[in-house]
Image: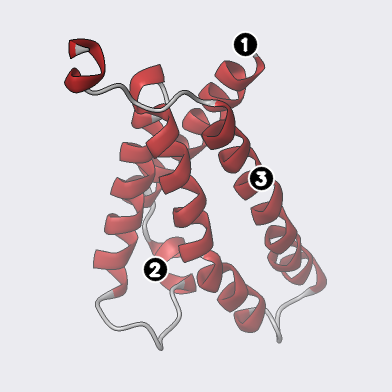
Amino acid sequence: MMIDRMAKALSGLLMFMGVLHFVAPKPFDAIIPKELPGDPRTLTYASGAAEIGIGAALLPTRTRRGAAAAAAALMVAVFPANLNTVRLAVDAGPAIKTVAWARLPLQLPLIGVALAIWRKSPAARTSTDTDA
């Protein structure tokens, strides 16, 4: 039951943040490292769509294990944007710097939650599993 609650909480967080990528994309565009190839808005929308899709896939037990692995990978993939936020905040005021730095360690427990869900969720069953 604890894993179910963790999956629902992570799902809600991912879907909320994913929707924000579409509703208010400018702050997400701004933190995408300029070194990454591609249009920042396209990358913002792509990461938002990934968050919504992964969040939705965390809800059914059948897709939860794969979605949890994808969630952990996504959080690792967006980490450069969090690092870039710190880089961009170098000349900002103390409040902005504090928020930028505070985001960095938050990724670790989120990755840990995703991995815990992955470890504790049953593997998806295939049609050949039930044929035997």
Q: Earlier in the sequence, mark 1 or mark 3?
A: 1
Residue drawn at 68 percent across, 59 percent down: 103
Amino acid type, callout 1: Met
Label 2, label 3: how far apart the Cα atoms are: 26 Å
Mark toward the viewer: 1 or 2: 1
Q: Which mark is residue 56?
A: none
Residue on which disc 1 sits = 1
Residue drawn at 34 percent across, 30 percent down: 57
23 relative position to 111: left or right? left
Element type at mark 2: helix
Instruction: Tally the numbered discs.
Output: 3
Amino acid type, callout 2: Asp
Label 1, label 3: how far apart the Cα atoms are: 17 Å
Element type at mark 1: loop
Tags 1 and 3 touching, CB below 8 Å: no
Q: Residue furthest front?
A: 132
